[in-house]
Image (spheres, rainbow, N blue to C red):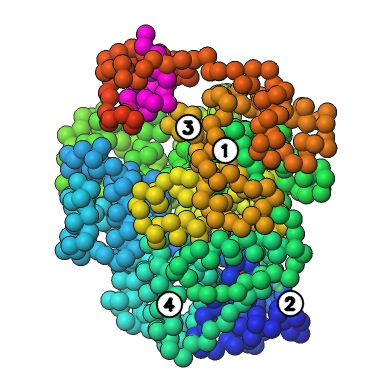
Amino acid sequence: MVLDYLKDLNKAQHEAVVSTEGPALIIAGAGSGKTRVLTYRIAHLLNQGARPSTILALTFTNKAAREMKERIASVVGEKTARYLWMGTFHSIFSRILRAEHEVIGFPSSFTIFDAADSKSLIKTIIKGFQLDDKVYKPGTVAARISMAKSNLITPEAYSQNAEFRLTDKGMRMPAISEIYKEYVKRCKLSGSMDFDDLLLKTNLLFRDHPDTLEKYQQRFDYVLVDEYQDTNFAQYLIVKKLAALHKNICVVGDDAQSIYSFRGARIENILSFQSDYPNHKIFKLEQNYRSTQTIVNAANSIISKNKRQIPKNVFSENDSGKSIKVISALTDNEEGFLVAQEIAETQLRDHYKNSDYAILYRTNAQSRIFEEALRKRNIPYKIYGGLSFYQRKEIKDLLSYFRLVINPWDNEALKRIINYPARGIGQTTLSRIEAAAVSHETSIWKILTGLPDNNPGNLNKGTIAKLLKFVVLIQEFSKAVAENDAWEAARLIAEKTGILKDLHSDKSTEGLSRHENIQELLNGIQEFSISALEEGRPSKLENYLEDVALLTDQDSDKEEDRDKVTLMTVHSAKGLEFKNVFVVGMEENLFPSSRAEEKKSPEALEEERRLFYVALTRAEENAWFSYANQRYKWGNLEFCSVSRFLLEMDEKYLDSPVENARMRPATRSASPEESVSVGYRARNKAKQQPEKTVQKPWRQDAFRRKIESQIPGATRDNQFVGDDPEKILQGMMVEHQRFGIGKVIQIEGTPPNKKATVFFQNAGRKQLLLKFAKLKIK
Ligand code: ATP
Ligand code: MG
């Protein structure tokens, strides 16, 4: 095989690819070919005769692993590429843990809890401990436990760790340590691991069983890691241990793109690499191949404001490109409208595909506005994050059956489906069996299979009969799973449980879509079975489940999603590239997020700036920044200030200046519906005068003046006048422009930040800042 793939590399990349022995640190800016170097390095190793099963490559998403594998396969052939150990940390280490399950005392068929399962278990524990779940918020407790695990702090170490204890006390949750202990115990009883366990247990496995560690050290001649700047302590240690023997370790990363410190990622890992491997080689890649010069230079100008960084000189020799367009909108809805308009217009002019566009936002909640705007224009889009396919109720229900059949100790799966479809097993019965399981330190399944002779929950005959019927059903499934491949078994379960029938009989739109989703899941399982059989891999239901449990939101890559605009958070956009990128919501307290402001720490702000750097460097040809003058927050239309990141940027990269002051109030508080129609009217107007508006619709002042002068009523005062906020008292009935009539249940704070909690008849409970809420006393 010729080495002609090497000609796709520049000199620095070439060197980094061919220096395969010894520790190597590739530290480089965005878009400079880090991932490409890693991919080619593996292809090169294989071409040099390395066996694929001796190469371990760790990526950030399954999708990245898949793409790298495909690329490598195109150089060395699919058969060779198949045997690479390539995947995310979680998928690779769950594979190792399954192989070594006896050593760690878990069943080989252990199931994996997703975030919702963990949270639900934590909730049960909090309730069991009779703690107040308004103080002990399950999400916060889950995050504390996760933080402890990714720093390898076991429950025992946690209770002795002064720092953790002090913080918990400060957060008025001194019992977290006890919850953590119970959580670990119950996961073990369930034969289940959460995501953090996959890393923690691998570390413990290697720490406590040197012979096992040595086996894997011997196995992996080469270890490679992408996105090294976002590894946490647990991941860092595993990599270090595995590479300790051969020391052929190659990591690539960019300190300027470290954006996961809230998940425990440590930028220092890059720095410690240098001291961990004193005879390492460093490769710096500086030429960006992804983006125009304008985009690269603008991104450099942002990141140079950060104090903590490794100096780099990233440059592009691509076209200089167009200036970055600034879109200033009156309201958040108009922001959506203008972004969709830009997409439609540039598509018409430059013939871009839908998939050439990405809209990147700081928080998931922002997606709705863009979804609506794109839908109105019939522009197809796909959304990453939010509720992924595998988190949908009907999918989780069926997957829970699979989980339970494969691992009957999995309490979270059992609780989910013991009464779905309905079989007359009520919450009280379930609580009793669960309590019995907890007090006997065993699983719910064990209690069920002990019936009727062992009846610790004092259940009556009728209930016992129903429970035993359920047990028999699961046992039948378990037999079917053992005898069939994944597809046959899954189809049988979907039918025999009655799930298919249940969904089929629901003729509402949601019912239909749920039925379709189940069909789609089954199609996916069929595909899995076929390709596993073709490739000679195990094709059982448990093998399918292993794959699915490790999928992340970023991984969904369905055929039908191919030509769509991508909507995603900046975090999930890491490593990706698009011809056209909109970075939206460029406002203070949104991007940078208000959390950075609350923390008042320069580090938090620097992380936000790195996040902004990541966002902009996704763009190949064109970039846009957009912001709104007013945005709905907690039910109120609030004025926004333009993001400091835009003000920091050298104006020469922008097509229009950004106002350096708190934004002027818009002429009236437009409701979201109204502001969209304002946008539409403006667009219709634009159609009549294409030259003027179509070219620069983002020009803030011109655009606003246009609306004010041409749309009747756009400047009229808001007709809804509220009463003096000071007169609003607890117990009063009030009216709100959007939420209607409600009762004030609480008043807190002092002017001007006085807040009212109001229970609205139609809109439920809302907390409102009185100065903006314009409440009318009824
Ligand atoms: P990020 O920091 O965003 O992860 P990266 O450093 O991993 O980026 P890649 O994704 O590997 O960069 O490369 C960016 C783009 O530049 C890709 O489209 C890649 O194919 C292209 N590229 C990289 N090196 C070269 C080269 N020598 N010649 C042509 N194109 C290249
Ligand atoms: Mg990359």
* Residue drawn 32% across the image and 65% down it: 151
Mark 1 C-beta to ligand 1 under 8 Å: no
Q: Is residue 156 left or right of residue 26?
A: left
Residue positioned most to the bottom: 279
Q: Out of 659 and 75, give the one closest to the viewer.
A: 659
Mark 2 C-beta to ligand 1 under 8 Å: yes
Give the Cα separation between the discs numbered 2 and 1. Answer: 43 Å
* Label 1 vs label 4, nearer the camera: 1
Residue 283 forms part of the magenta stretch: no
The stretch in magenta equals 755-778
Secondary structure at numbered mark 3 = strand
Residue where numbered disc 1 is placed? 628
When asked about the image quadrant of residue 274, the answer is bottom left
Q: Which mark is residue 106?
A: none
Residue where numbered disc 3 is placed? 638
Quadrant of the rendering where the N terminus is positioned: bottom right
Q: Amino acid at mark 2?
A: Asp
In the rendered image, residue 721, in percent from the top left (x then y), is placed at 46, 15
Q: Which mark is residue 271?
A: 4
Give the Cα separation between the discs numbered 1 and 4. Answer: 39 Å
Q: Mark 2 touching mark 3, by CB under 8 A?
A: no
Q: Amino acid at mark 3?
A: Glu
Q: Bin the neighbour count of mark 1 within 10 Å (Cα to Cα): few under 14, some 14-19, many 20 and up.
A: many
